[in-house]
Amino acid sequence: MNTQTVYLISLTAVTAGVTILLRAFPFLTFGRTGKPPEIIRYLGEVISPAAMAMLTVYCFCLHFQARPLSAAHGWNLPEIAAGLLVVGLHWWKRNSLLSIISGVVLYMVLIQKIFP
Amino acid sequence: MFTRKVLKSAWLSTIPVLMGYVTMGFAAGILFAGRVQTPAVGFWAFLTSFTSISGALQFLLSEWAEKHAPLLDVALLTVCVNLRYGMYGFSLLERFQGIPWWKKCYLIWTLTDETYALEVENKTPPGESSLSYCLAMAGLDHSYWVAGVTAGALAGSSFPFDNRGIDFAMTALFLVILTDQCREARNRLPAAIGLTATVFCRFFFPPDKLLIPAMILMLALLLAGRKKIERKREARP
């Protein structure tokens, strides 16, 4: 087996293993009491919005790294415009699929045709 | 055990999930094929989506597989991204009690945001078994996701097209989830903490080394400010 295959097997095992353990967590640990420890309950509630904000910033950092600030790249305008479209449309229409597809299409058009 | 009536109502309930999963899965699959260098990209897309069934994770998997991210980092980030799954089971403990273990295992394995929402809603047709109905929905949602991701990876690797910018699907997915969470005032402070921690860490780390320090800082802030955050959350339900 080459390194890539070994890595992909390990990656699949780690991600799936951790995800399945998380899903099984209540059934494995507190099956009798039906209540999580306070600290776990607290983290379970606040970590989702915090992690989504973290991942959003991370994604924008990746885009900005791939297309550094310059006139040819439209001064990061594609990222900002597509991001605002997604948030605005989603706040208004509450249709996840519509918001995501519109944002991706706008972004692809902007970076492929307008600021290539 | 699956009557026509159960299958039909499970199918009707999951149609919105079908559209979401196939579309998002397809985008994640295209990205996976574009990033991961392996001849059997369709197989790996199938295997990863089949085993973990997680949207945010599927996009991150492309990044990790491309850069060969350290597995410890991968494990920590997976906990962070999917910790919410660990909370869903608590509201299903009673419902899942006393059912055959292998059915319980399958329901646990397939517990995604969307399937969980449908199982809690539980629109079992009158006179039918709610267990069969939930199992049918879980199986359908599972197959939609795997089909979407695998088809996307196969399409992306066999018909090369200009897919520059498709990676914005991941950004848009996180933005949409974040927007939905921020509709509730109680989630805004935790979101602001995640945002601030990550922006702060960006001054010291390049993007590919950003997530672990950001996660640590974010957790430290969330734990240190627990009293304040909980008081605010109670004041604004």
Image (cartoon, coloured by chain):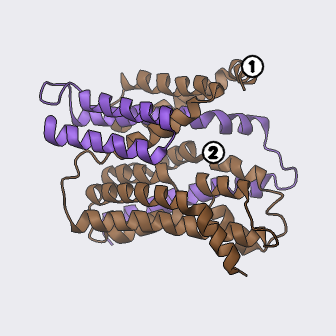
Chain colours: A purple, B brown
- How crowded is the residue under tag 1: few (<14 C-alpha within 10 Å), some, or many (20+)? few
Q: Which residue is drawn at 25% across and 27% down?
A: A77
Foreground tag (2 vs 1): 1
Disc 1 target residue:
B235
Q: Check disc 1 and give the amino acid type.
A: Ala
Q: Which mark is residue B65?
A: none
Q: Name the residue nearer the viewer: A84 or A37.
A: A84
On screen, residue B204 versus residue B119, left or right, reads: left
Q: Do labels 2 and 1 share a chain?
A: yes
Residue A39 in the image: state x and y as whole percent.
74, 34
Q: Which residue is drawn at 24% across and 27% down?
A: A76
**Precedes in sequence: disc 2 or disc 1:** 2
Q: Name the residue nearer the viewer: B99 or B65.
A: B99
On screen, residue B222 versus residue B177, left or right, reads: right
Q: Residue at x 75, y 23 (%)?
A: B234
Residue B155 in the image: state x and y as whole percent.
28, 66
Q: Residue at x 58, y 62 (%)?
A: B14
Would you identify the image quadrant in which residue B22 lies? bottom left
Disc 2 target residue:
B84
Q: Name the residue nearer the viewer: A108 or A8.
A: A108
